[in-house]
Amino acid sequence: MSNEDPFNEALRNWVETSMHRSMHAFIRYSRESSLSLSQINSLFRLYHHGPSPVNDLSDHLGITMAAVSQLLAPLEDAGLIKRSEDPSDRRVKRIILTEKGTLHVRESMRARHAWLADLASLLTPLEKAQLLPALLLLNKHSLTLAQRHQHTHNHTCANSAVDN
């Protein structure tokens, strides 16, 4: 028997179940799309952060610029991304998500979230009404934590730059 706080245990169980379902669908979609997880990660990065120089993707993925170029070549061939010169520095190549790439990312998200419709169909209207305030509160606090993490990360990066 667990001595864990019942709320924390229930929350952990929910997170584990939902992550398992989401990731299972995501990995299945990844296999069907014939893209590697690093390639899909690159598409998501571009989707959420906009056009990026190759070195930003290299830093994000933790691989060399040469490896990023090899990783991106099939995405470019498939019409999911395009390379362009940075208007402020023609030596820098920016990677841009195409409309086809955007649709691919959105399809991936739909596949990952499809099970939620099945879950919602199991809930009665009363249960949905009861859960909605709690979900909104969890989302609010999750965003607060994300913002704190981003602030701490930015502060740590700034201190590292000063130390170097």
Image (cartoon, helix red, strand yellow):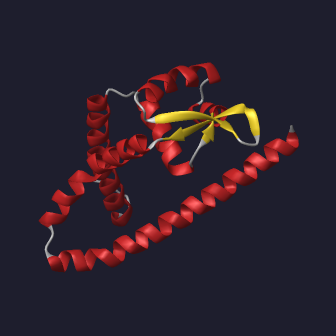
Give the residue displayed 29% in from the left and 50% down from the top: 110
x then y, percent, for residue 87: 71, 42
- Examine the rendered structure and indicate whether residue 58 appears above or below residue 46: above
**Residue reaching furthest right?**
163
- Examine the rendered structure and indicate whether residue 60 appears above or below residue 158: above
Q: Is residue 91 left or right of residue 112?
A: right
Query: Which corner quadrant holds the C terminus?
Result: top right
Give the residue displayed 43% in from the left and 67% down from the top: 139
Which is nearer the eye, 108 or 159?
108
- Examine the rendered structure and indicate whether residue 90 appears above or below residue 3: above
x then y, percent, for residue 54: 63, 32
x then y, percent, for residue 39: 45, 31
Give the residue displayed 33% in from the left and 64% down from the top: 6
Which is nearer the eye, 124 or 37?
37
| Count of numbered tags | 0
Which is nearer the eye, 136 or 109?
109
Give the residue displayed 74% in from the left and 46% down from the top: 157
x then y, percent, for residue 135: 35, 70
Residue 75 position by quadrant: top left
Q: Is residue 116 left or right of residue 80?
A: left
Q: Is residue 34 left or right of residue 114?
A: right
Residue 150 position by quadrant: bottom right
